[in-house]
Amino acid sequence: MRRFMDTPEYSALSQLVKDPYFGKRLVFFRNESEADFLRSWLSAEKKKDAAPLLMADLPELGSFVKNCSKCGAAFNKKNGIGSGKNGLMVVLHSPLMIGREIQLYRKESSDMLKRIISAMNLSFGECYITNMIKCESADLLVKPSEMITNCLSLLEKELDLLKPKIVVVMGEIHPLQKIVNASRGVFWFDIAHPLSMVKNPELKRDAWGTLKKIIAKMKESEIV
């Protein structure tokens, strides 16, 4: 069994089982020995992933998203993660993509985000990371542009409660322009979304140029 854990097959099975699309589907096994191994392995994976990030000590943040019904019936509501302790907020505005494609690149996109935070010499858990669109609507008639508009008030509440010094928008910043113009004492930057950089590595060059400006501003603003 130990040798199996070092194989590509083990890695592939691990990703398949943890994929939200397949995670609740059936897992087949040949005998009770394999069943016991899978139960033990999945239990260990859950314990390993169970350590929560230190969240911002602001219960209002979660309730705003949970209680919002502007887009009608919604699912997969996304709360921000991280404490925001270091004064940096990241707003993820993902490109419009077919849902299954997003699932395929989810791990690579997450890893890219962590590398970007690491390149700024910051702790991932001490940033506050949120999504521009905070849920998925069950109403197919609700347009993405409407969802963005509906979510702007939630983003304004996050900004008001967390009071970040720097906000990095990863993706299209134009829909946030009104908020950017109205904010005082907050420095805004935008780079490509991690998912876009995974699919188009040439975007990393421009992103790195912007990251150097962010790092300089962090030093100026005494973000550590």
Image (tube, grey):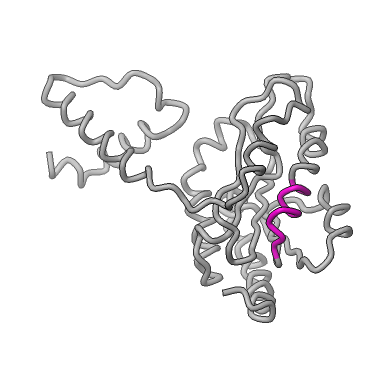
- Which residue lies at the image location 64% right of the left edge and 70% below the top edge? 211
Q: Nearer the viewer, residue 18 or 152?
A: 152
Residue drawn at (26%, 39%) of the image: 44
Horizontal and vertical percent for residue 203? 64, 60
Q: Is residue 165 left or right of residue 205?
A: right
Which of the image's four quarters has the N terminus?
top left
Residue 184 falls left or right of residue 140: right
**Of residues 207 and 70, the one drawn nearer to the viewer in this rendering:** 70
Q: In this rendering, is residue 25 above or below 63?
A: above
Can you say whether 220 is above or below 170 in the image? below
Q: Position of residue 137 (x, y in %)?
A: 69, 25
Please name the residue shown 28% across and 34% down the image.
Answer: 42
Q: Quadrant of residue 186?
A: bottom right
The answer to which quarter of the image holds residue 36 is top left
Q: Is residue 37 above or below residue 54?
A: above
- The answer to if 10 sits in the magenta stretch is no
Q: Main secondary structure of the magenta part?
A: helix
Q: Which residues, given as a range, are shown in magenta?
A: 155-164
**Which residue is pictured at 54% across the width and 56% down the height?**
113
In front here: 202 or 68?
68
Occupied quadrant, residue 145: top right
Which quarter of the figure is the C terminus placed in?
bottom right
Seen in the image, is 91 located left or right of residue 141?
Answer: left
Is the residue 65 above or below the residue 159 in the image? above
Pinpoint residue 50: horizontal percent, then vertical percent. 37, 43
Residue 141 left/right relative to 126: right
